[in-house]
Image (cartoon, rainbow, N blue to C red):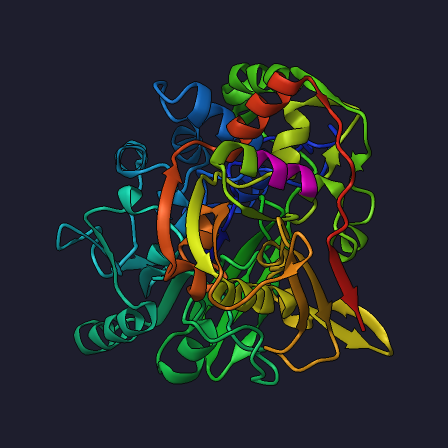
Amino acid sequence: MIRILMTSDVHACITPYSYATGKEEKIGLAKAAHLIRRLSDENTIVIDNGDMLEGSPLSYYHFQKNRDKANPFSKLMNMVGYDFYNLGNHDFNFGEEILFDHMDTLKMPCITANVLYRGKPLSEPYRILEIDGKKIALFGIMTHFVPNWEKEENIRGLEFLDAFECARKTVTEIKEKEKADYIIGVYHGGMERDPLTGEETEVQTSENQGYRMCSEIEGIDVLLCGHQHHPMEGKLNHTVFLQPAQDGKQIALVEIGEDSLTAKLLETDDIAEEDILSFIKEEEEECQKWLDQPLGETAIDLNISDEDDARLHKSQVITFLNKVCEDCSGADISGNALFLHAKGFRKQITMRDLVSTYVFPNTLVVKKVTGRILKEYLEKCAEFWDLEDGRIIVEKHHDFPTPLHFNYDMLDGVEYTIKVSNPLGQRITKLTRNGKDVRKGDVFTLCINNYRAAGGGGFMMIKEAETVREIQRNVVEIIAEYITKVKVIDFQPIYNIKIEI
């Protein structure tokens, strides 16, 4: 029996405790490691499918406060006992030095076939393994959409080849040169269509190409996916596919018998590995103290109890974030999204509140936009909403298979109305600034995060707008500095967005 185990999108979640609540959950690499070790034997292949470095407060703390120290996440991967790793888009967030230090520290081979550095491949196109009398071909690829999100200085010298074309080329090469019994693809990307119906589940940008790979590339026996943070398992065409949940909640399991292949997702164990917890203990304790560091207070309610309502009626957390961005940048208008599972701020604000609410390592960019571009931007944001039985709901493709709540920005500096029953592209029925209608030729400065500035989420009108200024500081640091300066957050609530049926 050959067994393949894969984690994906662990996002530097190591311990089994929620950073927001402190409660133990079935998450984290320490618990995933227990399951991996329990199931592993000499015929087991253990793989990580990328996005290990970024995503938790511990990661933020390490790369902001202890950047000069050895990266613990790479060493933890060695301790778990991975045999191979694939890179994910967030592994590039901290720049070339951190990326290559990570790769140099890892004691297992990289299998990312579609990334070049200075014109040369980062890894071999595939690996051939002979286990238990069978020949396994293993190749890895990742979403080539990274340049659409990442800061240019972080990926200078890197080239991302089309994932689908690279997969097809690699499979063809394996079939021509090797006599593999099974071809296994490891893809840091997901399904762009519903595997059962073929219905589009997102805008077909090529960020995710898993459905196309299963449908059009003959010879892939198993495609192990990631990136979308949505559990998925099944068979499409002749290819079995698995996609585990993020944060170490699940692992993908493939078992190859004499004449059989089975695949399923497994929930991680209740037991956390003590050596993993012990290794990270000191820095984790430092991180926890830092998270509880008081920054200031708020005189108004900035708590999030209902995320959908907070978006539908614009929580004042967004007003506050926009105020911070305007203060930092001097821009006329600012826009922020309420990220998934954001907790907002308690009366006594700590770093824990900040990193549980603003969860991405973004920086800020100021763009020059016309009234025409501003309206296009808002029309794109308005696509987040839909109608069902006479009530306003989140449009289904923004919820499944990947929650895309970070693609609904709420703006300050203008007043506008979204009429959800109108056709797409015609939903902004009112757009004013200080009570005056915004005209197509009006010019404004707009402060948004670097992801949106790069066109992330399909906001190409923002990418194409002139860049006025880049503020190369982490947004969480900017927010913390602002709170420390003002000490007490107090402002008149602003309800400048109206959403109607």
Is 336 situated left or right of 61 in this image? Answer: right
Prevalent SS, magenta region: helix
Which of the 4 quarters of the picture holds residue 303?
top right
As drawn, 294 above or below 373: above
Which residue is depicted at the point 43% across and 72% down?
205
Q: How many badges with numbers are in the image?
A: 0
Is 185 situated left or right of 448 in this image? Answer: left
- Please state the extent of the stretch shown in magenta in the rendering: 319-325
As drawn, 363 above or below 252: above
Direction front: furthest residue: 436
Which residue is depicted at the point 13% across and 55% down?
119
Which residue is depicted at the point 69% across and 33% down?
18
Is the C terminus in the top left, top right, bottom left or bottom right quadrant? bottom right
Q: Is residue 44 visible?
A: no
- 263 inside magenta stretch: no
> Which percent across, then down, holds residue 318?
68, 43
> Which percent across, then down, holds residue 372?
49, 68
Q: Nearer the viewer, residue 197 or 417?
A: 417
Direction left: furthest residue: 119
Q: Nearer the viewer, residue 138 or 71?
A: 71
- 322 inside magenta stretch: yes
Q: Nearer the viewer, residue 29 or 136?
A: 29
Q: Nearer the viewer, residue 362 or 26?
A: 362
Which of the 4 quarters of the picture holds residue 406?
bottom right
> Which percent across, then down, holds residue 286?
56, 14
> Which percent across, then down, holds residue 342?
69, 42
Q: Is residue 360 visible?
A: yes
As drawn, 353 above or below 444: above
